[in-house]
Amino acid sequence: MQGALGDIVVLDLSRALAGPHAAQMLGDLGARVIKVEHPAGGDESRGWGPPFVGPGHDISTYFLAANRNKQSIAVDLKSAEGRSLVERLVRQSDVLVENFRTGVMDRLGFSVERLHELNPRLVILSITGFGHDGPEGGRPGYDQIAQGEAGLMSLTGPSPEEPYRVGASVADLLGGIHGAYGVVAALYERERTGRGKVVRTSLLAAVTGVHSYHGTAWTVGGQVSRAGGNHHASIAPYGAFRCADGMIQIAAANDAQWRRVAALLGLDVDPYVAKYANNRERFTHRDELIADMERTLTKHDRAHWLAALGEAGVPAGAIRSIDEVYAWDQTRSQGLVVEVDHPVLGTIELPGPPLRFDGDPPVRHTAPPALGEHGDEVLAWLEARER
């Protein structure tokens, strides 16, 4: 198999998005990922839509987003036969991924102790909603609930009175990203210790872990960040601005960049020079700054200003729709769109992995599997490993 994890086997017991995203990232790095799904319907995200595609309009594009580079087997974990098969797979795996509620794995007969009894080298990734312990550790969690509970919605939206969810499921996706890098670290440590360990993260941890300067604004500065629309909480000018035919984004993160913006917009004269002399002053007068900038920006269209700002070396950009992003030559040049051959849909395009490694040949990705598609193949592989 190709990739840095080409000799690693991942047993993916997860469903929905956070766990499958983590396992998909490991698959992108070359691991063999065996996705265990219930025979009656499989991963619940197979039923999430619209849109649904295919001749019977029964294939969820949501499922397609988080399950490339995997093999699917249908197993009832509550049956003796199913548990026996999973035990055999655990013995032959390097990593197990699960995102059940706290206690479910124990009730299924797969406690951490039992898993390490079966395979002491097993790395276990457990993703929960709010953590595996603590006063609220057993709570179920979905992305939007975590966005609210972990403060992200309070930072997002046009004003503090109108909290918004982030449009992408960032709690789930960040949980998957954190989980995947935790797994890689545990695999590296296993090279020294010879033993696997449990990697734990949660949707709460994923969102809190990216508070960054919003976190220290409170923990050190005693200031609670609030939603501020499309402008940065600490830097000005940094945000979305109106032009004659719509909006562009401008980010002047230092005084040198600001001077170039000021020269373009005619704000390099008194009284603007003193009022907007540095970031502290620009942020203090941010509403006036936005109005002064837009007075000139609205005289020309977006294309004019993007060209002028680009020539001046000022970070600026369009606000693209999703279809425009995937049609953009730059997106495609970075390997962020990949083609796979789906058994029902034929050749389709999927969002590609965010990592590239210099010198590696192009990776051949496989399509997200049909439910139980690889049952015979995985059993044959398992029997060969057990010999």
Image (cartoon, rainbow, N blue to C red):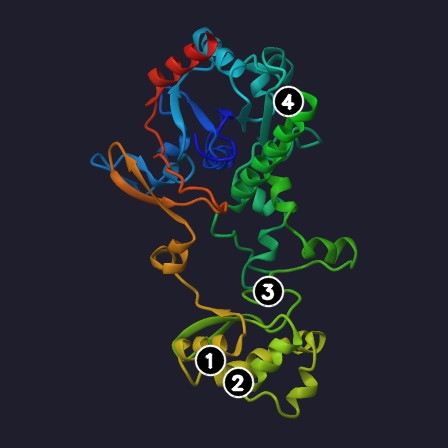
Q: Which residue lies at the image location 40% right of the left edge and 79% below the top edge? A: 301
In this view of the protein, which residue sits in the foreground, 154 or 318? 318
Q: Earlier in the sequence, mark 1 or mark 4?
A: 4
Front label number (3 vs 4) = 4
Tell me residue 223's x, y (percent).
74, 60
Kindly identify the amino acid type of the residue bearing the numbered disc 3. Gly
**Is disc 1 in contact with disc 2, using a CB cutoff of under 8 Å?**
yes
Question: Looking at the image, can residue 164 be seen?
Answer: yes
- Residue 228: give its label: 3
Q: Is residue 318 above or below residue 152?
A: below
Q: Name the residue under label 4.
A: 196
Q: Which residue lies at the image location 70% right of the left edge and 22% below the top edge? A: 193
Q: Which residue lies at the image location 36% right of the left edge and 21% below the top edge? A: 40
Q: Earlier in the sequence, mark 1 or mark 3?
A: 3
Q: How far apart are the two marked residues, 2 and 4, measured between alpha carbons?
A: 58 Å
Q: Earlier in the sequence, mark 3 or mark 4?
A: 4
Instruction: Rate crowding at label 3 as few (under 14), some (14 to 19) or many (20 or more) other CA atoms within 10 Å.
Output: some
Q: How far apart are the two marked residues, 1 and 2, measured between alpha carbons?
A: 8 Å
Q: What element carries label 1?
A: helix
Q: Is mark 2 on a helix, strand or loop?
A: helix
Front label number (3 vs 2) = 2
Kindly identify the amino acid type of the residue bearing the numbered disc 1. Ala
Q: How far apart are the two marked residues, 3 and 2, measured between alpha carbons?
A: 26 Å
Front label number (1 vs 3) = 1
Q: Earlier in the sequence, mark 1 or mark 2?
A: 2
Q: Mark 1 points at which residue?
A: 308
Q: How far apart are the two marked residues, 1 and 3, measured between alpha carbons?
A: 27 Å
Picture quadrant where residue 303 is located: bottom left
Q: Which residue lies at the image location 39% right of the left edge and 26% below the top edge? A: 71
Front label number (2 vs 4) = 4
Q: Name the residue under label 2.
A: 264
Kindly identify the amino acid type of the residue bearing the numbered disc 2. Leu
